Image (tube, rainbow, N blue to C red):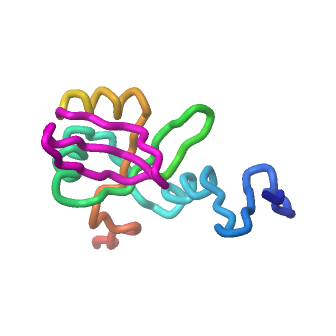
Amino acid sequence: MDKAQGPEAAETVQTTSVPAVDLPRLVRLTSDHGYSVSRDHHNLYDMAQSESVVCFVDYHDCRDVACTLVRRNSYGTETEIGARGLTYIAGMSREEFVIQCRRYNVEFIPPNTPAHPPQVG
């Protein structure tokens, strides 16, 4: 990997096959542009059963962008949050999922939430 050049090089890494992604800046930009985030993990669990939801997860010393995924197999249904093949959270029940969401400081963008709500009046 080559270090990116420029004023934000400390936060950005460039690989040969994937363009540079500045995850800390990307997470900041969600609130900078008016997106609301939620920590209603029970609601996140319910939504995850029918759709993939964009999430932000604390992992070691960084904050990552991830999404929900549901796996159904002979053992039951497992609700996960992960990114790029890495699973951060996996719960076989709503309670397990919610406990892990709290542990990893999960926030999510509720689907169909406008970035800038229309001004009334």
Residue located 47% across and 46% down the image: 86
| Image position, residue 58 (x, y; %) | 50, 37
Horizontal side, residue 87 vs residue 32: left or right: left
Q: Nearer the viewer, residue 86 or 48?
A: 86
Residue located 45% across and 47% down the image: 56
| Image position, residue 84 (x, y; %) | 49, 55
Q: Quadrant of residue 91?
A: top left
Q: Quadrant of residue 63?
A: top right
Residue located 43% across and 32% down the image: 104
Q: Nearer the viewer, residue 68 or 77?
A: 77
Question: Residues in magenta?
Answer: 66-93
Query: Relative to residue 78, is residue 9 depicted above or below?
Result: below
Q: Nearer the viewer, residue 46 or 80?
A: 80
Main SS, magenta region, reads strand
Q: Quadrant of the N terminus?
A: bottom right
Residue located 57% across and 53% down the image: 28
| Image position, residue 19 (x, y; %) | 67, 69
Query: Relative to residue 14, is residue 65 depicted above or below?
Result: above
Q: Quadrant of the C terminus?
A: bottom left
Q: Nearer the viewer, residue 15 or 67?
A: 15
Residue 86 belongs to magenta span: yes
| Image position, residue 77 (x, y; %) | 16, 43
Horizontal side, residue 72 vs residue 120: left or right: left
Residue 22 belongs to magenta span: no
Q: Residue furthest front?
A: 74
Horizontal side, residue 18 vs residue 65: left or right: right
